[in-house]
Image: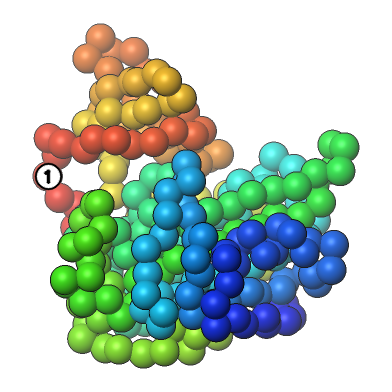
């Protein structure tokens, strides 16, 4: 895939830029920034990062896929980040729905949005914020346990240099996805899930559901069994608590 690359020293948000300029962007366009003042994750959380500390990247796509498959592109990007980290000898896992973690500490967060024209999929915007050069004192300012490539392997590098290898992983997986659907990647995605078997408290809007995660569906949904033996599946939600399970290896 061709990837026209737009880079900013500073911008409000690469994701927001893609959204505001969707009509002008080519399929496969990549937007990066050294710093973004309004970077966000899910539920509007801010992405905290000094200039040059994180890879801040958005991919703009016009995929010829069924509209229902659009959200799976978030997981294609997540697996691509796992592959990039493996190149750095960092073993990363996925924390449903949109975090990449190392030793149960967040190293990357992802975000996706889709636009439609009537019932037809118009475009999909997927973004990643990956901690690259942060040291422990900086990471301790974040409101949840976090790590970085530097902390895990002692290497500092210019974040934008990670764009070509990350896109190499993404293009390979994207080709499989557009040809065969996410079923071609679901086994790999499941194997990388860190929450299987763990007891969680799941927030869905203003409701909560607590229980043990028993499986992940082919649509990337999560199945949770409560103490009464009731199993419910969720395609979205927020894991607000994890406890009572041994760490997973591999």
- The image quarter in which residue 48 lies: bottom left
Question: Which quadrant of the figure contains the N terminus?
Answer: bottom right
Q: Is residue 146 above or below residue 207?
A: below
Task: Determine crowd level at label 1: few under 14, some 14-19, many 20+ residues with C-alpha closer than 10 A.
Answer: few
The residue under the point 51% across, 60% down is 38
Where residue 193 appears, as percent x and y from the top left, is 34, 50
- The image quarter in which residue 171 lies: bottom right
* In the foreground, 23 or 191: 23
Where residue 133 appears, as percent x and y from the top left, is 31, 81
Left or right of 35 in this view: 62: right
Where residue 83 appears, as percent x and y from the top left, is 42, 72
Where residue 4 appears, as percent x and y from the top left, is 73, 81
Q: Is residue 15 above or below residue 193?
A: below
* In the foreground, 188 or 228: 228
Looking at this view, name the residue that lies furthest to the right: 118
Q: Is residue 243 above or below residue 2?
A: above
The residue under the point 76% across, 55% down is 123
Q: Is residue 250 visible?
A: no
- Could you tell me which secondary element the residue under label 1 belongs to? loop
- The image quarter in which residue 156 lies: bottom left
Question: Which quadrant of the figure contains the C terminus?
Answer: bottom left
Residue at numbered disc 1:
246
* In the foreground, 189 or 1: 1
């Amino acid at each position: 895939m061709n990837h026209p690359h737009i880079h900013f020293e500073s911008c409000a948000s690469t994701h927001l830029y893609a959204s505001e300029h969707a009509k002008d962007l080519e399929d496969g366009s990549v937007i990066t920034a050294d710093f973004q003042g309004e970077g966000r994750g899910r539920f509007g959380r801010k992405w905290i990062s000094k200039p040059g500390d994180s890879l801040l990247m958005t991919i703009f796509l016009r995929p010829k896929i069924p509209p229902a498959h659009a959200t799976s592109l978030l997981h294609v990007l997540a697996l691509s980040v796992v592959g990039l980290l493996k190149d750095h000898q960092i073993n990363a896992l996925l924390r449903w729905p949109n975090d990449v973690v190392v030793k149960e500490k967040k190293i990357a967060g992802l975000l996706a949005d889709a636009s439609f024209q009537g019932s037809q999929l118009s475009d999909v915007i997927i973004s990643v914020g990956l901690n690259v050069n942060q040291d422990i004192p900086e990471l301790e300012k974040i409101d949840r346990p976090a790590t970085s490539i530097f902390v895990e392997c002692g290497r500092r590098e210019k974040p934008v240099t990670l764009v070509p290898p990350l896109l190499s992983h993404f293009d390979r997986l994207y080709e499989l996805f557009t040809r065969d659907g996410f079923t071609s990647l679901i086994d790999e995605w499941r194997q990388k899930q860190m929450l299987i078997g763990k007891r969680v408290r799941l927030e869905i809007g203003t409701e909560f559901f607590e229980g043990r995660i028993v499986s992940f569906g082919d649509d990337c949904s999560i199945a949770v069994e409560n103490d009464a033996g009731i199993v419910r599946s969720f395609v979205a939600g927020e894991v607000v608590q994890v406890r009572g399970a041994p760490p997973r290896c591999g």
